[in-house]
Image (tube, rainbow, N blue to C red):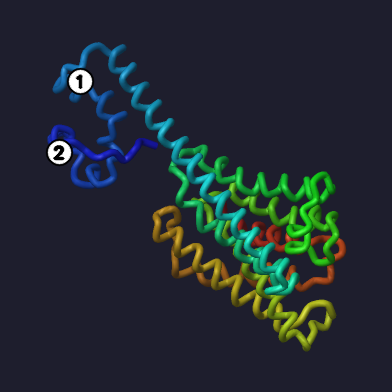
């Protein structure tokens, strides 16, 4: 993708005289440096020299753009990594000082870390490699979970804040599956697909809030699964649906998605219902919610929206 660099007066005049029009001037798609220096008309106007010299100049410009994108993505990766680390450390501290309960800390980290991660994707560049820089964030967190889960360098506050029973090996189950879901969403779907966004919305927001609401108001259990409640499932559907719509609108407003809002609400509702039903099934002992919910959401969203 060509860089959207400011147009000089000469370039501006050339674009208009060449018939590219105001749309081209707005998007810079056709009047980018890489396009202009290869144009025969531009060669004649500027007298830049031989074709080999032009290719050399074009190569230099492409190299500069690629370097700029890489530096941009490195900075974005450092910023997101710092934010993720600060979030976890904050809840580790709150748990250690008994400001909030371990179960609530674990769920708040579950909800916030994934949603803040997907909200941060737009700060990465428009290069095709940007998603891999973003993927470095969950990869680092996954390695941290493996190191602590195998007791190679145990961090007691981390274990206490993100596990149910405070055992290191728990990090290799739900928390690690959670990080893998983030990794899959960012690498395979990224910003131009609603599928990854919805899978994280249902896993982080929907499932996370379902657990909190179920613990507090879940006295009435679902008949086929006494470990799940109507309050939890209803909350998962409402919040998962709402967060999904919010993310789709967010990325649509930034120009990454082109949504048909006449049918989007219905499709998101169907996907949210599928994920909610799967989460309510008595299969948690065999398949963790951090696996079943994102997989069910990805499949339902793929069938509803395509790839």
* Residue receiving disc 1: 43
Does residue 15 sit above or below 233 in this rendering? Answer: above
The residue that appears at 83% across and 83% down in the rendered structure is 223
**Among the 4 quarters of the image, the one containing residue 53:** top left
Could you say which is closer to the camera, residue 288 or residue 267?
288
In front of the other: 72 or 302: 72
Residues at marks 2 and 1, CA–CA distance in whole angstroms: 16 Å
* SS for callout 2: helix
Quarter occupied by residue 44 = top left
- Quadrant containing the N terminus in the rendered view: top left
Percent position of residue 128, x then y = 49, 38
Residue 203 in view here: no
Q: Are marks 2 and 1 in contact (CB under 8 Å)?
A: no
Residue that carries the numbered disc 2 in the rendered image: 16
- Give SS at disc 1: helix
Above or below, 285 against 24 in this view is below
Number of residues whose C-alpha sits closer than 10 Å to that of mark 2, classed few (under 14), some (14–19) or many (20 or more): some
């Amino acid at each position: 993708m060509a860089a959207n660099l400011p147009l000089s007066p000469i370039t501006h005049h050339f674009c208009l005289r060449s018939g590219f029009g105001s749309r081209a001037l707005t998007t810079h798609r056709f009047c980018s440096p890489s396009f202009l220096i290869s144009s025969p008309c531009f060669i004649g106007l500027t007298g830049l020299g031989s074709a080999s010299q032009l290719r050399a100049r074009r190569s230099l410009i492409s190299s500069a753009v690629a370097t700029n994108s890489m530096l941009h993505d490195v900075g974005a990766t450092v910023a997101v990594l710092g934010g993720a680390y600060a979030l976890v450390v904050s809840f580790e501290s709150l748990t250690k000082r008994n400001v909030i309960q371990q179960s609530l800390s674990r769920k708040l980290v579950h909800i916030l870390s994934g949603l803040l991660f997907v909200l941060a994707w737009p700060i990465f560049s428009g290069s095709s490699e940007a998603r891999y820089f973003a993927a470095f964030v969950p990869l680092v967190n996954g390695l941290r979970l493996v190191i602590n889960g195998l007791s190679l360098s145990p961090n007691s506050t981390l274990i206490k804040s993100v596990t149910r029973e405070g055992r290191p090996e728990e990090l290799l189950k739900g928390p690690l599956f959670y990080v893998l879901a983030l990794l899959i969403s960012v690498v395979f779907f990224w910003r131009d697909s609603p599928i990854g966004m919805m899978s994280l919305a249902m896993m982080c927001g929907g499932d996370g809030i379902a657990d909190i609401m179920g613990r507090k108001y879940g006295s009435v259990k679902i008949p086929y699964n006494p470990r799940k409640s109507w309050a939890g499932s209803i909350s998962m559907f409402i919040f998962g649906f709402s967060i999904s719509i919010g993310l789709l609108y967010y990325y649509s407003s930034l120009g990454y998605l082109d949504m048909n809002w006449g049918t989007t609400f219905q499709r998101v509702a169907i996907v949210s219902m599928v994920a909610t039903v799967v989460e309510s099934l008595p299969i948690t002992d065999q398949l963790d919610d951090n696996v079943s919910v994102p997989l069910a959401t990805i499949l339902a969203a793929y069938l509803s929206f395509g790839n």
